[in-house]
Image (cartoon, coloured by chain):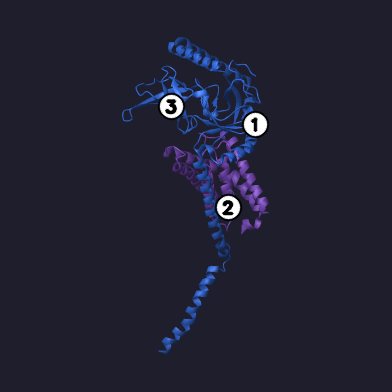
Chain colours: A purple, B blue
């Protein structure tokens, strides 16, 4: 069951990554696309808790850092999505999250994830950008992620709930 | 007295019973607590372990620079993801071309009329302006120079675009080392300079766009041949601009001057004479005693699709190569 869960999670991340770089640029606004990998990590965090989501966030982030066309210091998305998995996993596990709670979690973690990525770039000297420009990208990113939430999160959460019903409802 | 003592006697065992009760409460008869307590510790140690892993990744890659130990991992992932991205982009292209099928003949006729009018206006402009005619002659000369140097183009399509959230401007194209491409080659399209190749796998290559904040291109103003450096601003989309700083501070570029690449030794990373953009604004700063010009690139980066990679003439490739004289090999 663990291996099946890991395989399903990996498949989700790969599909999310490919859609993010190959499909969504056609719909992008100023080059800003929804962060599907982040949505997958949040979805697993809300059903499976922080441990699984953190590991998945690290793996997904490392893929985002290393797979083409990425060209920045590796480990930055890994750090951002790992923290996203941790924070989203801290949302109450004992009750099934409501739609509002899910949307709020996505908005908060999207802001957190992109900000951590941008800040790590500023600290490492990997990024030269103005703060208003950064905030605009982060803001539009949050809007995109919230817009895509009703299409991605139910799919991810239902899949993981079905893979292990006891853990999801406990 | 006895009344006062009695409570103290009865209290003693009670106070003695407090520590075990506290311990019991910490272990938690409550199922929620029992489930959460060990979980907490596990989460924290995993968080620390993964944070250390991130720090290791960042350190390895940041210190390594161009010879980072993660470069082989990048290549392996590129080999794996490249074909998937190419396939997805092919499917997406099928869908994005659907609206074209439904265009009626009327629509096409209107388009033709519009284009004819535009063409006539452009022709008139070229014919009437000496300045433009001179510039055209200059272009011709530069193109001829490129032809003499013997460059050829490998055609290729953009299959993946880095999200703006990464704050770097890179794309993946579907031609790699098998098509004769290697790092530090110039990438152009029919409008002008696109960028340069950063790294290649067998089937794909990653291209750094000139708009990226890390990109510096040696440029020359077409009219005065003054040299300078063009830096990207890291902004994609409609307001993507480049900043030009001229080597000679006394020269003030005129608006609408065309900027071309200056060219590097052996044509790497940029070959000479590729049009980059047009001067739109000029700022003179007394404090910095320098002139900064804003360049609007000719290439529309928000709808980048077909590009060409400049390769030495006669290099072997897995696809048809466009030679400098326009023939296809």
| Quarter occupied by residue A24 | top right
In the rendered image, residue A28, in percent from the top left (x then y), is placed at: 54, 35
Q: Report the disc number at residue B229.
A: 3
**Residue nearest the observer in this picture, A169 or B327:** B327
For numbered disc 3, what is the local secondary structure?
Answer: strand
In the rendered image, residue A62, in percent from the top left (x then y), is placed at: 56, 44
Is mark 1 in CB contact (under 8 Å) with mark 3? no
Say whether residue A12 is left or right of residue B117. Answer: right
* Subunit ID for the residue under disc 3: B
In the rendered image, residue B117, in percent from the top left (x then y), is placed at: 53, 14
Is residue A149 visible from the viewing direction of this image? no
Q: Can marks 1 and 3 be said to lie on one chain?
A: yes
* Subunit ID for the residue under disc 2: A
Please tell me which of labels 1 and 3 falls first in the chain. Answer: 1
Q: Report the disc number at residue B90.
A: 1
In three-dimensional space, the C-alpha distance between marks 1 and 3, rounded to whole angstroms, equals: 37 Å
Compared to residue B53, the image places residue B213 above or below, namely above
Q: Quadrant of the C terminus of chain B?
A: top right
- Bin the neighbour count of mark 1 within 10 Å (Cα to Cα): few under 14, some 14-19, many 20 and up: some
- Bin the neighbour count of mark 2 within 10 Å (Cα to Cα): few under 14, some 14-19, many 20 and up: many
In three-dimensional space, the C-alpha distance between marks 1 and 2, rounded to whole angstroms, equals: 34 Å
Residue ID at (55%, 68%)? B27
Q: Quadrant of the N terminus of chain B?
A: bottom left
| Quarter occupied by residue A165 | bottom right
Is residue A136 visible from the viewing direction of this image? yes
Question: In this rendering, which labeled residue sits more in front, label 1 or label 3?
Answer: 3
Say whether residue B62 is left or right of residue A164. Answer: left
**Residue nearest the observer in this picture, A117 or B202:** B202
């Amino acid at each position: 069951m663990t291996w099946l869960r890991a395989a399903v999670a990996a498949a989700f991340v790969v599909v999310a990554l490919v859609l993010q770089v190959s499909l969504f640029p056609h719909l992008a606004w100023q080059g800003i696309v929804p962060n599907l990998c982040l949505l997958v990590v949040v979805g697993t965090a809300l059903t499976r808790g922080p441990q699984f989501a953190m590991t998945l966030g690290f793996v997904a982030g490392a893929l985002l850092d290393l797979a083409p066309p990425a060209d920045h210091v590796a480990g930055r998305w890994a750090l951002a999505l790992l923290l996203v998995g941790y924070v989203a996993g801290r949302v109450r596990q004992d009750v099934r999250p409501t739609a509002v709670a899910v949307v709020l979690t996505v908005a908060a973690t999207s802001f957190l994830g992109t900000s951590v990525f941008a800040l790590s770039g500023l600290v490492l000297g990997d990024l030269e950008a103005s703060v208003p420009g950064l905030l605009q990208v982060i803001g539009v990113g949050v809007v995109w992620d919230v817009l895509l939430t009703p299409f991605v999160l139910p799919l991810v959460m239902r899949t993981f709930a079905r893979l292990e019903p006891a853990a999801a409802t406990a | 007295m006895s009344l006062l003592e009695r409570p103290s006697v009865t209290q003693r065992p009670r106070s003695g019973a407090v520590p075990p009760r506290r311990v019991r409460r910490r272990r938690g008869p409550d199922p929620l607590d029992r489930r959460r307590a060990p979980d907490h510790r596990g989460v924290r140690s995993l968080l620390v372990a993964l944070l250390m892993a991130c720090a290791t990744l960042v350190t390895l890659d940041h210190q390594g620079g161009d010879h980072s130990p993660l470069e082989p991992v990048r290549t392996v992932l590129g080999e794996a993801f490249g074909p998937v991205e190419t396939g997805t982009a092919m499917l997406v292209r099928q869908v994005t071309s659907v609206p074209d099928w439904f265009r009626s003949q009327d629509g096409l006729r209107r388009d033709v009329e519009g284009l004819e009018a535009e063409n006539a206006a452009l022709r008139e402009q070229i014919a009437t302006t000496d300045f433009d005619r001179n510039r055209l002659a200059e272009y011709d000369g530069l193109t001829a120079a490129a032809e003499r140097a013997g460059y050829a183009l490998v055609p290729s399509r953009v299959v993946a675009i880095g999200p703006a959230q990464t704050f770097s401007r890179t794309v993946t194209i579907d031609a790699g080392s098998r098509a004769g491409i290697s790092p530090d080659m110039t990438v152009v399209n029919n409008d002008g300079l696109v960028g340069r190749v950063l790294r290649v796998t067998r089937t794909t290559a990653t291209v750094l766009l000139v708009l990226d904040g890390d990109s510096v291109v040696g440029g020359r103003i077409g009219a005065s041949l003054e040299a300078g450096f063009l830096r990207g601003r890291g902004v994609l989309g409609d307001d993507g601009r480049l900043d030009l700083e001229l080597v000679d501070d006394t020269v003030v570029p005129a608006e609408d001057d065309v900027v071309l690449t200056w060219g590097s030794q052996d044509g790497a990373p940029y070959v000479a004479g590729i049009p980059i953009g047009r001067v739109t604004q000029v700022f003179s700063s007394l404090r910095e005693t320098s002139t900064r010009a804003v360049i609007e690139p000719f290439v529309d980066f928000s709808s980048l699709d077909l590009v060409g990679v400049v390769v030495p003439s006669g290099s072997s490739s897995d696809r048809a190569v466009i030679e400098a004289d326009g023939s296809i090999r």
